[in-house]
Image (cartoon, grey):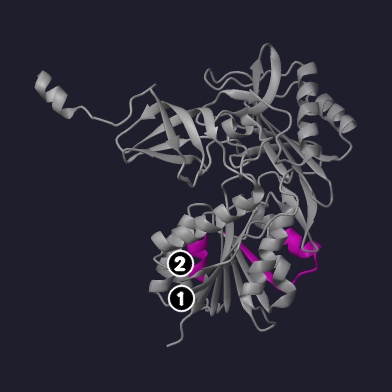
Amino acid sequence: MSIIKENTMKDYPVKKNEEQIVTILDLSHEGMGIAKVDGYLLFIENALPEEEVRVRIEKIGPKFGFAKVLEWLKESPYREEDAKEELLRTGIAPLSHLTYEKQLSFKQEQVTNVLKKIAHMPDVTVSPTIAMEQPSHYRNKAQIPVQKINGQLTTGFYRKHSHTLIPLEDFYIQDPAIDEAISEIRDILQRFGVKAYNEEAHEGFLRHIIIRRGHYSHQMMVILVTRKPKFFQADKIAEVIKEMLPEVVSIIQNVNEEKTNVIMGPTNRVLYGKSYIEDQLLGKTFRISAQSFYQVNTEQAEKLYQVAMDFAQLSKNDTVVDAYSGIGTIGLSLADKVDHVYGMEIVAEAVKDAQTNAAINGITNATYLEGKAEKIMHQWAREEVQPTVVFVDPPRKGLDASFIDATCEMQPERVVYISCNPATMARDVKLFAEKGYQLEKVQPVDLFPQTVHVECVGLLTRVKD
């Protein structure tokens, strides 16, 4: 028995809790430092390439382990000295310890690498990442968890891979007006005796405070996510919030009764004002509801969409499909440049917003339908809708293979792929290539400075027979 146990035990070159001195070789796609001990991979938070560090081994597994920095023996010339450790520990800003110039090149390399490894397209040009002029305090939306700590209603963010709340008031990447509003609302709710939600026991009341603020309009929406519909003194609380925060035009209670990690539930109740805010993007006005998707970095979204439109080489003769259209930001931004825009979106509320947004902007050449993108594309193919350009802006999971099939059957001249996940984009452009579409070029845009996320635009053109 002991012989069998001895033979099956793993023999790793490192042991848990031991200390090692290592040199950081590279950054992972999650922004962690990568080191090797006798070929064994270690991932290390808050460690940058070229640094020499003394670490303690925290976890080990068959292929790799994790370690924690105890001491920096040699620091990278690209380290930001004033980086705040809580931004790294929570994952709010996991690249905030790296100079912004290096963040941009890191993101360009990420896109280049996945195109080589996944799409097998090493020769496609990936341009330098388009930077943000002031790469902090940019988010127009915040979703902040609430807990009771030392008897007080506390806001902050979870430590990575846990539900331990680290109290925070300056979130660094959020609009400062949003940060101030979160603290103000938290204190108001504390005065009214509102109880924080306890996730483990599934007890208490207030789960999250969500705030959206228009980048140009400065209209503010406050969403209080609660465990139960009954909200004692809701009207009085809304009245005080509005009094203390004059920018607020909408206060909504969102009810989420489930024991789940999903932040918002299905039910919204307006406590004050409207059920939406409005803001501008590329000169158009957009109505944004509580659960509608809207890019969180307005300044960079305008650059992103401009790149997409430039890639598309639009003319008045073009018929455009705007897949995963959300509230219509892409399609309506380009509607005056083309003959007609067809959009589809699975979220019913967003479709209504897109239709309203078309009316607000006096746009009559846009059609929006509710449903899955792949299903609607097949429907339009049967109805002989013939797009010349298809824009896709899918969620992180990328495109459904049946959507790619339906798109290629319609034979648009160009497909403009806007991606928030270069790895799934690389997978998808490989499928497009198999069906006669060539990836011409890719432009990364930094929509999420200080984080590992990179948005990019790719241009696919149909190869003529």
- Magenta range is 355-379
Residue 307 higher or lower than 223, as above or below: below
> Residues under labels 2 and 1: Cα distance?
8 Å
Task: Estimate the x, y position of residue 245 in percent, counting from the top left.
Answer: 86, 34
Q: Quickly name the residue at label 1.
A: 437
Of the pair 154 and 337, the residue shown nearer to us: 154
Of the pair 297 and 338, the residue shown nearer to us: 297
Task: Estimate the x, y position of residue 397 in percent, counting from the top left.
Answer: 48, 52
Residue situated furthest front in the rendering = 74
Residue 99's disc number: none
Residue at (75, 54) in percent of width and height: 133
**In this view of the protein, can residue 451 be seen by the observer?**
yes
Classify residue 144 by image quadrant.
Answer: top right
Residue at (68, 57) in percent of width and height: 131
The amino acid type of the residue labelled 2 equals Val
| Secondary structure type for disc 1 | strand
Query: Mark 1 and mark 2 in contact (Cβ < 8 Å)?
Result: yes
- Whether 96 is among the magenta residues is no
Instruction: Decide if residue 174 is on the left or right side of residue 112.
Output: right
Of the pair 428 and 226, the residue shown nearer to us: 428
**In this view of the protein, can residue 259 be seen by the observer?**
no
Residue at (67, 64) in percent of width and height: 305
Q: Label 1: few (<14), some or many (≥20) within 10 Å?
A: many
Viewport quadrant of the C terminus: bottom left
The amino acid type of the residue labelled 1 equals Tyr
Viewport quadrant of the N terminus: top left
Q: Quickly name the residue at label 2.
A: 429
Instruction: Decide if residue 31 is on the left or right side of residue 337.
Output: left
Task: Estimate the x, y position of residue 71 in percent, counting from the top left.
Answer: 53, 27
How many numbered callouts? 2
